[in-house]
Image (cartoon, grey):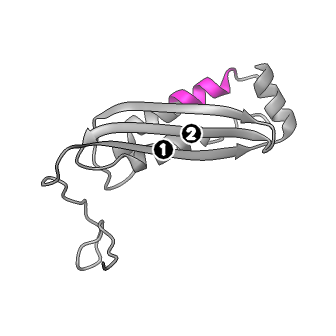
Amino acid sequence: MASRLTHLDDSGRARMVDVGGKPDTERLAIAKGEVVMKKATLDLIRAGAIKKGDVLTVAQIAGIAAAKRTSDLIPLCHPLPITHAEVTLTLDNALPGVVITASVKTTGKTGVEMEALTAVSVASARPASRWKR
């Protein structure tokens, strides 16, 4: 089978893929990422002592919101009726840091891989005010 990028037309220009003829099926995507930090920062997060508050809950909510808004953030993504989005953040001493896992589901004509990846990306974003170093 020849490999071809589906979001490029025959002239090499970007296009949104037509999924209109595909049947609706249950779709699930899981993505994972890591935020590596100083052990002292991880200890502050664990103790709930970050000055800005509960960074894990903020990151979790941001990730879920991002999954739901992926088509607004990523060009050429279809807007999808997300039926479930879950973002878990696990403290990991071995990194040291936080492991972020996003699970996204829908029933539709296309997958939710970009939604899961976007959830992890946004949940792991580190603006200066989010994670204290």
Q: Is residue 99 visible?
A: yes
The N terminus: image quadrant: bottom left
Q: In the rendering, which numbered label is found on residue 30?
A: 1
Q: In the rendering, which numbered label is found on residue 10?
A: none
Q: Is the magenta stretch mostly helix, strand or loop?
A: helix
User: Residue 126's spot in the image, x, y percent?
Assistant: 66, 41
46 relative to 107, above or below: above
47 and 53: which one is in front?
47
Q: Name the residue under label 2.
A: 101
23 and 67: which one is in front?
23
User: Residue 127's spot in the image, x, y percent?
Assistant: 65, 40
Check contact, mark 1 vs mark 2: CB within 8 A.
yes
Dot 1: what SS?
A: strand
User: Residue 115's spot in the image, x, y percent?
Assistant: 41, 44
Residue drawn at x 87%, y 34% is 40
56 and 21: which one is in front?
21
Decide if residue 51 is on the left or right side of residue 88. right
